[in-house]
Structure formats: C-alpha cells, structure tokens
Amino acid sequence: MNTLTLFELNSLVRQTLELTICEEYWVCAEISELRVNRHCYMELVQKDMHGNGIIAKARAQVWSNRWSLIKAMFESVTQQTLTPGMQVLVKAEITFHEIYGYSLNITDIDPTYTLGDMAKRRMEIMRRLEEEGISDMNKELQLPRLLQRIAIISSASAAGYGDFCNQLKNNPEGLAFKTQLFQATMQGNDVTSSIIAALNAIAAHLDDWDAVIIIRGGGATSDLSGFDTLELAENVAQFPLPIITGIGHERDDTIIDLIAHTRVKTPTAAAEFLIRHQKEELDLLESINLRISNSISNLLLAEHARLKLLANKIPSLFSMIRKHEEIRIDRFVSMLGYNSLRYIDTKKNDIIMLNKQRALYTQDFLKNKKIKIEFIENKLKNSNPERILKLGFSIARINGKAIRNIQDVKEGDSIETTLASGTIKSTVTWKRT
C-alpha cells in the first residue's frame, strides 16, 4: 500500500489541479461573507432553486493590487458597494494550498450581471406589493391642506438633514413649520430596521403629524441596498400618513421612492416641495377670502343702492299722500273735524313705520348673508382629512398589513386596530361573512 503524508497528498492535489485546470472561469455565485483587510476576502455560495439551502460553497479572495480597481469599477457602474447577499459574476483562478486548501482567486467582475439581478429583485418586490394590493396605498393618501407638522426620518449627522432644516426655517415666504427628527441609520446594514423603528415611533402619535419626510443627502450614493427591501417597502406603502422621500441620489430610484406618496431628488428639494405646497394653499385661501369679501361688498352696494332708491321715492309718496289727505280734509273737515286730524296723524305714523321696516329689512338681509358665509366656512373645516379618524373610522392590521378581506383573517390571529385615540390589540375568536 502506497502511504502518503497529508502534505504529500495536498501537494499532489495542487499539482493535479495546476496541470489539468490552467485557465480562468467565469463563476456565478452569491456573496455570503465579505471582509476587507487590505485584501478582500469572501465566501461564495450557491443556494438551491428555492433559496432555502446551500448546495455549494467556496472561499475566494481579491488581492490588493486588483481589489482597488475592481471595487472602483463595480461601484461606478452599479452605484452599489459589494455586500453580502449580492449575486455576482466573477472571473476566477482555481487555487489549492497545502494548508489553506481550495479557494478562488478573483481577477475580474462583471457589474452588469449584478445590475440585472438587482433589477430582477426590484421587479419581484414590486410584483409582491401589487399582489398584496398595497403598492399604491401611500400614493392614494391626500396631502393635508395645511402641511405644517413634519416628522423627519434621517441621521442627525447627515448634511442633507441640515440643508433641509435650513431651507425650511429660512424660507422666503416666512412660513412656519413644526419639525421633529426621528433618528435612523441611512447607510449600511441597519437601514431597513432603523427606518421601520422610526416609522413605528411616528405611528404611535399619528395625530401630531401631517406627513413624513425620509431624507439622506450627504451619504455615499453607492450604498442604497437598504432602501430596496420588501420589509421596508411594505411598511412605507401601508403607512397611514403621506411619505415624501428625498434620498439624495440622481441616477436611480429605490423601491421606497417608487411606492412613497411623493419622490423628490434631494433634501433641499423636499423642503422646497413643502414650502411650495404651503404657499399654494395659503394663496388659495386668500383668493377664497377675497372672493367672499368682494361678494359681500357687492351685495351690500346693491342693497344700499336699492334702499337709496326706495328712500328717494319716500318724499314723493309722502307728498302724494299729503295732497290726497288735504283734498279729503278740505272735503270732509266740516263733517269730521277732530277725527280728520287724527286720520292725518295716522298716515304720518304709517310713513314712520315704513322707514322702520326698511331698516329692519336691511338688517335681516345682511344677517342672512352672514349665516351663509359661516355655513361655507364650517363646510370647509368639516372637510379637513384630519377629522376622518376622529369620526369613528379605524384601521385594522395583521402582521403590519392592512386587512382588506375577511378571508385574510383566521381564528387565533392577533389583530392591531388603530383608532383616533390609540391602538387596540385583540385576538380573533370568531368571524362572520
């Protein structure tokens, strides 16, 4: 029996590989681990067709003289950094070391393959959202007429956050806004979880806010993968307040850009959007107020002219009455005497009453117009969307998703019901269709 030491066996394997496999191969795989310490070290895996189990695994490395070139080229094309979970197409040499064993020495990477996989994942997320019937839920919300109370999700150290606040505070219209920062991580592995946590904190006090702003400007434009997850998209799509995104990247839209109520390019543009919306609403209210004032003025002028016309007719009417009464007095004075004088006094009193009735009619007319104006104002107030939840409406959710069909609920499910005054958690014991 031919006996070999382990070193001899490993050397034989290395020599066999070097003799039989001497070319490079393009390899499709998923990055499961990645660390950089001058050189870049990865673990590549392939999962089964359902994505549940690993069917192949290999160590890989990119030596420092190649890593800086590959990294720069990949980020320039994809606007993303290489991170665990990405599908990649790499060109690699097969190597075997007596101590470290089998590994792949990566010499090149095809960024277009990763771009295709990223686009495929985005399409899959959008398909899931459409199947759940929530892709347009946030877009369908109506922006409040007065958009003043703004909840901000961002990092306090982000340059974009400071730009947004300065633009809003120093707006040329002198408009006042109430803002509060809900701190979140805007790059790296914690983007999704931290933004969801901020949304939950805002949802606990919905009545305090008119809209939510998610801004990020100032961070690395190559690190946007955290904004392209199904979990974050579901939370944004179903959030009960309008969400405006200004993530600060010009080239691509993230998933939450696509399903949020309004998408602008930068934090500064988000502030300009709020200022413009507020200015347009105030201009509209001023226009309505001016039209109401003009209508009242025109009505008053018309009534004043009508009353003046009536007043001008009174002397001639009084003169006619007096002449008529003088004839009656001359004809019947001898017959009526004292009673005729009383008759004249009665007619004079009738004229005085006519003047009083004229004044009362004017007052009643103006009062009726005032009532109509107050009715219009109350109607405008009652149409305010903020009153919807306070009128008794509620939102029921299961696992964070709005319930649209009773078939989505089964006995034993835990349900959260959001009311104007708070949230109720309950368990389904029975249901009826």
Image (spheres, grey):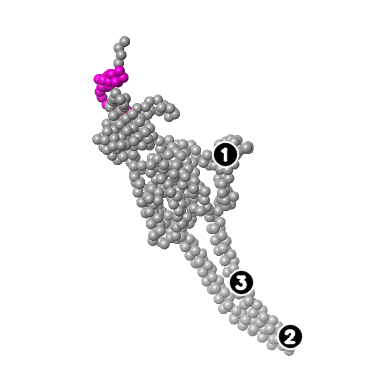
Alpha carbons under labels 2 and 1: distance apart: 94 Å
Q: Secondary structure at mark 3?
A: helix
Q: Is residue 370 left or right of residue 161?
A: right
Q: Which residue is mark 2?
A: 339
Residue furthest right in the image: 335
Q: Is residue 332 visible?
A: no
Alpha carbons under labels 3 and 2: distance apart: 33 Å
Residue at 31 percent of width and 39 percent of height:
75
Q: Which mark is residue 240?
A: none
Residue 223 at what x, y percent from top left?
36, 42
> Which one is in front in this view, the residue at disc 1 or the one at disc 3?
1
Q: Which residue is mark 1?
A: 414
Q: Which residue is mark 3?
A: 361
Alpha carbons under labels 1 and 3: distance apart: 65 Å
Residue at 66 percent of width and 79 percent of height:
350
Quadrant holding the C terminus: top right
> Which one is in front in this view, the residue at disc 3 or the one at disc 2?
3
Residue at 38 percent of width and 54 percent of height:
162
Residue at 60 percent of width and 74 percent of height:
359
Q: Is residue 396 left or right of residue 192?
A: right
Q: Secondary structure at mark 1?
A: strand
Q: Secondary structure at mark 2?
A: helix
Q: Is residue 138 left or right of residue 427?
A: left
Circle 1 crowding by C-alpha within 10 Å: few under 14, some 14–19, many from 20: some
Relative to 224, residue 366 above or below? below
Say which amino acid is labelled 3.
Answer: Tyr
Residue 419 at what x, y percent from top left?
57, 48
Residue 171 at what x, y percent from top left?
39, 59
Mark 1 and mark 3 lie on one chain; the one further toward the N terminus is: 3
